[in-house]
């Protein structure tokens, strides 16, 4: 019961501040926390990145393997996105199979990457219908201070930009891996922008305290041409149609700012 | 993406003969399972979905109980025979995600604070899937909740819109969903002009995204009318039955 009371008092405080255009951590309503992106942080992974969004920290590692294509996409390589909320990241996280939050996160990140066709999957096909490269994206949350979706999407994109693929050769119908690598062919750079709705006002890049009191969450991803490529509403609150379109316009601008950070790194 | 399939022909007709802004035929029935506290059935095109509500009842596992309100637990599940290729019965990641977004779409409609320390358990079984099952799932679940007598602020109606064959279309079927350019499922509470579920995959400009939402809201409004009729139909049937009994006496 205490926590419910605390969260109600806290919510009132956060909401009152937001109505006057302020936030507990001194940011403006449309301001991001400082973003830091490091790439190539794990040598044994084919691609990797570590993103800090304020105190939120997420690592994405990419491994490339060989596998079979999906039966309905025989000419395409395979992309899979997984995420783990490991217990070091928060007192709220427990070891064990992924919960619905982490599955949702992985699927939202996956949608952004897949729908904007970041990876030219056809180029990852080795033998149609039989053998393809599989790109495994594993998102590892290291410190949870809110907005894991945007941090994970950034980490994934940054990791993909420095991902290398094995060189290979076909010998008697078998794939033989040769020394050396090639860069993974990338075509697009989607950026996710998440809002929290707190008592009817939208704030960008919510941190943990804001997430704990938010009514609804809205993530909109934009590709490099300024097109919407993934949307996800979360949380048990609702949004008006006008709020959604307003958010989309803000998100488009924010995505452009953020994309510069990744493409530069 | 295959270019061979024509999703919208020159006359603006779709693969199943519909107009761009036309819903598939929808059949709704309330009170279809005798064991459940509330239940409903929907057919939307070839989608066939059952929803059942049990509760408010004791919470399992018990530690999930909240002191100030009920919790809503939701399971969206597809029957193994509901799709072309058999779907393994254990819940997929997609089903886990959909269970979450459907729950979050319905929660805002329910007065959960009326039933502290209890659970309202909602089960959605997709018997046949043909595109747009999450929307149809929300629509039918909302009726099952109402049928269970759970106090609600409004019915939640849901429907998708999107882009297929270069055109903005309402209520995408399976082919349009798979081969089309974008899909935007929306759930809506008419009385409060509130969007309770919103997702998108595909590629759309902001303007198209807005058009898709508007189109989907239009669909939701039409479905809302059907929902109310279906609820009334159940009680009209009971009334007629009662009158017959009185006449016989």
Image (tube, rainbow, N blue to C red):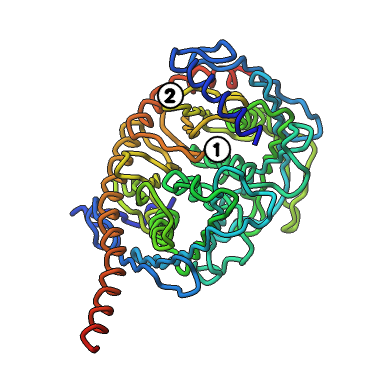
Establish whether labels 1 and 2 are both on one chain: yes
Q: In this view, does B2 lie to the left or right of B24?
A: right
Please indicate, yes or no, whether residue B166 appears anywhere in the rendered image: no
Where is residue B47 shown, x and y percent of the image?
40, 65
The residue located at (72%, 42%) in the rendering is A64
Residue found at the very far left of the displayed protein? B11
Q: Earlier in the sequence, mark 1 or mark 2?
A: 1
Circles 1 and 2, Cβ within 8 Å, touching? The answer is no
Tell whether B162 sits left or right of A158: left
Closer to the observer: label 1 or label 2? 2
Q: In which quarter of the image is residue B136?
A: bottom left
Cα–Cα gap, marks 1 and 2: 29 Å
Disc number for residue A201: 2
Give the numbered dot on residue A182: none
Quadrant housing the N terminus of chain A: top right
Q: Nearer the viewer, residue A216 or A164?
A: A216
Q: Residue at x 68, y 55 (%)?
A: B61
Q: Is residue B129 above or below residue A65?
A: below
Q: In which quarter of the image is the C terminus of chain A?
A: top right
Whole-percent x, y for residue A245 in the image: 35, 30
Q: How crowded is mark 2: few (under 14 residues within 10 Å), some or many (20 or more)?
A: some
Is B122 or B11 nearer to us in this picture?
Answer: B122
- Choose top left, top right, bottom left or bottom right for residue A83: top right
- Which chain hosts label 2? A
The outermost residue toward the top is A26
Q: Position of residue A134 (x, y in %)?
A: 67, 47
Which chain hosts label 1? A
**B198, above or below B16, in the image:** above
Q: Which mark is residue A113?
A: 1
Q: Residue A162: x and y, percent?
A: 68, 28
């Amino acid at each position: 019961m205490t926590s419910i009371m605390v969260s109600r008092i806290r919510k009132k405080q956060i909401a009152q501040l937001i109505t006057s255009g302020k936030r507990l951590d001194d940011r403006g309503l449309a301001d991001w926390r400082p973003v830091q992106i490091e790439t190539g942080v794990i040598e044994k992974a084919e691609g990797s990145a570590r993103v800090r969004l304020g105190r939120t920290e997420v690592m994405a590692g990419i491994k490339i393997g060989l596998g079979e294509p999906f039966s309905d996409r025989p000419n395409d390589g395979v992309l899979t996105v997984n995420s783990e909320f490991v217990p070091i990241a928060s007192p709220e996280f427990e070891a064990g199979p992924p919960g619905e939050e982490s599955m949702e996160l992985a699927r939202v990140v996956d949608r952004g990457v897949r729908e904007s066709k970041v990876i030219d999957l056809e180029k990852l096909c080795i033998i149609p219908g039989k053998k393809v490269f599989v790109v495994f994206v594993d998102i590892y949350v290291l410190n949870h201070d809110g907005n894991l979706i945007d941090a994970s999407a950034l980490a994934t994109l940054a990791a993909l930009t420095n991902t290398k693929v094995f060189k290979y050769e076909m010998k008697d119908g078998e794939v033989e891996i040769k020394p050396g690598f090639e860069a993974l062919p990338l075509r697009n750079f989607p950026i996710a922008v998440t809002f929290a709705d707190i008592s009817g006002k939208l704030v960008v890049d919510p941190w943990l305290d804001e997430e704990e009191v938010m009514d609804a969450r809205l993530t909109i991803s934009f590709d490099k041409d300024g097109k919407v490529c993934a949307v996800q509403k979360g949380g048990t609150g609702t949004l008006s149609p006008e709020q959604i379109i307003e958010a989309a316009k803000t998100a488009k601008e924010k995505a452009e700012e953020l994309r510069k950070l990744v493409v530069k790194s | 993406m295959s270019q061979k399939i024509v999703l919208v022909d020159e006359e603006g007709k779709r693969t199943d003969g519909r107009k761009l802004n036309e819903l598939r035929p929808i059949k709704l029935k309330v009170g279809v399972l005798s064991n459940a506290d509330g239940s409903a059935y929907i057919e939307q095109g070839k989608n066939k979905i059952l929803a059942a509500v049990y509760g408010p009842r004791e919470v399992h596992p018990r530690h999930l109980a909240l002191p100030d309100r009920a919790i809503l637990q939701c399971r969206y599940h597809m029957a193994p025979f509901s799709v072309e290729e058999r779907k393994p019965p254990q819940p997929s990641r997609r089903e886990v995600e959909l269970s979450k977004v459907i729950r979050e779409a319905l929660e805002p409609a329910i007065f959960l604070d009326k039933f502290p320390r209890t659970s309202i358990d909602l089960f959605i079984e997709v018997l046949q899937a043909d595109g747009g099952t999450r929307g149809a799932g929300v629509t039918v679940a909302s009726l099952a909740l109402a049928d269970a007598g759970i106090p609600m602020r409004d019915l939640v109606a849901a429907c998708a819109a999107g882009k297929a064959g270069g055109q903005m279309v309402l209520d995408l079927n399976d082919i349009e969903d798979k081969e089309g350019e974008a899909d935007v499922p929306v759930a809506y509470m008419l009385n409060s002009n509130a969007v309770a579920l919103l997702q998108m995959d595909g590629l759309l400009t902001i303007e198209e995204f807005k058009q898709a939402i508007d189109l989907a809201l239009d669909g939701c409004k039409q479905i809302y009318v059907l929902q109310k009729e279906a609820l009334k139909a159940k009680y009209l049937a009971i009334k007629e039955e009662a009158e017959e009994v009185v006449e016989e006496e």
